[in-house]
Image (tube, grey):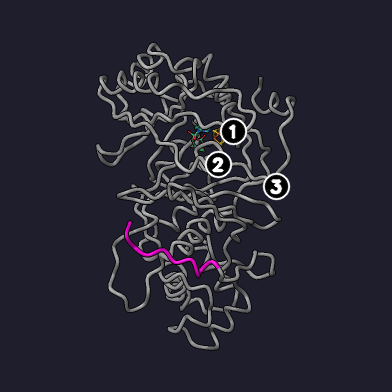
Amino acid sequence: MTAPITQDLLTIPRKLPETGLRNIVGLTRDELRDALIEAGTPEKQAKMRVGQIWQWVYHWGVRDFALMTNLAKDYRAQLAQHFEIALPEIVTRQVSADGTRKYLLKIAGGHEVETVYIPEETRGTLCISSQVGCTLTCSFCHTGTQKLVRNLTAGEIVGQVMVARDDLGEWPQPGAPKDETRLVSNVVLMGMGEPLYNFDNVRNAMKVVMDGEGISLSRRRITLSTSGIVPEIAKTAEEIGCLLAVSFHATTDETRDKLVPVNKKWNIETLLGALREYPRLSNSERITFEYVMLDGVNDSDADARRLVKLIQGIPAKINLIPFNEWPGAPYKRSSWERIESFADIVHKAGYASPIRTPRGEDIMAACGQLKSATERGRKSKAEIAAETGA
Ligand code: SAH
Ligand code: SF4
């Protein structure tokens, strides 16, 4: 993590996509081709133009058609009449004492989402959101107390990656030697929302992020976290191909029903069935089981033993997440001795059991703490009951 961090890109004015122009960011190659033809690009040239524009936008990070110098001047003007290259707008950026950065981003309609950048020794992980709020109501999650406002578009999902690259100064400089250091080396879909309830936009966005002519992140560096939307799990492997993490969090249906209420629809056995079938292209591709450590709720030695028994046969790693508190949260974090004892049992059973170090707690950027202050809509008890079938 040695590349210099520049701040000046922050001052680039960013338009919200309310100009009547079509935003190019987030369109798949096919969608971009169709849009270009619709805007007067001759069909025969369309594929080549897609390639050229794609490289400017996603490889070089260019935002102005006028700078796309391998296109004819009048064609650049024509593009500017129909299209824009627009990203979410940074409302605030907080930097934690540990280097974690939390961006509050404004998107069309005035809604806000959060994106978190977590720098580590050997990699930099960007945690992105897929929805404003969440329809689900996991009882330990801050986002879960907020109503679903809307799904993010593919452009808003890709836009989060581009905003972070802007802020970190990560776009290549023309003519400069190729720099293999990547500040945003990994993407996790672990921000606000349930990505598998916004499947098409998440898939299209990840296709753009993975495209080799652009941002070019390998599918192995993208992890999608789901609370367990069983019918979409196989599709994730087929249509995105990224790594999978599952918010498991409990070892009995009784407890999981309370923590992750979608368990009432797809219980532990059904979920494990889908995970057993999740295809992996190599042995190193394990499924991550996320397990939040809640004092006295799911953290006993008996839980640890049940957990390893349940997942037997699934290539897995178990990510223990010390509970991150938020105002009004009904749980407490397990003690470190408890977490270590749990980790030890899991480890002795042959599974990697990293304990996720809480990052950015001082700026409320840690797992499960994200919630946009502007979205005051809080779920009522009746709404929670209706959504969870409680
Ligand atoms: N909706 C998806 C992805 C977002 S949550 C999902 O549920 O998987 C990312 C991870 O943070 C999930 O494992 C989630 O269960 C966990 N999490 C939520 N609230 C938390 C909290 N307060 N403390 C620790 N982890 C939390
Ligand atoms: Fe939604 Fe995930 Fe939070 Fe559950 S843990 S409420 S699925 S964001």
- Tell me, yes or no, whether the highlighted magenta stretch contains residue 9: yes
Mark 1 sits on what residue?
326
Q: Which quarter of the picture shows residue 238?
A: top left
Secondary element at image label 1: loop
Q: Quadrant of the C terminus?
A: top right
The answer as to whether callout 3 falls within 8 Å of ligand 2 is: no
Examine the rendered structure and indicate whether residue 97 appears above or below residue 346. Answer: below
**Which region is colored magenta?**
1-10
User: Badge 2: how crowded within 10 Å, few (<14), some, or many (20+)?
Assistant: some
Mark 3 sits on what residue?
374
- Tell me, yes or no, whether the highlighted magenta stretch contains residue 31: no
The answer as to whether callout 1 falls within 8 Å of ligand 1 is: yes
Distance from label 3 to label 2 (Cα)?
15 Å
Residue type beneath disc 3: Thr
Q: Observer-nearest residue: 378 or 84?
A: 378
Q: Which label number is shown at residue 256?
A: none
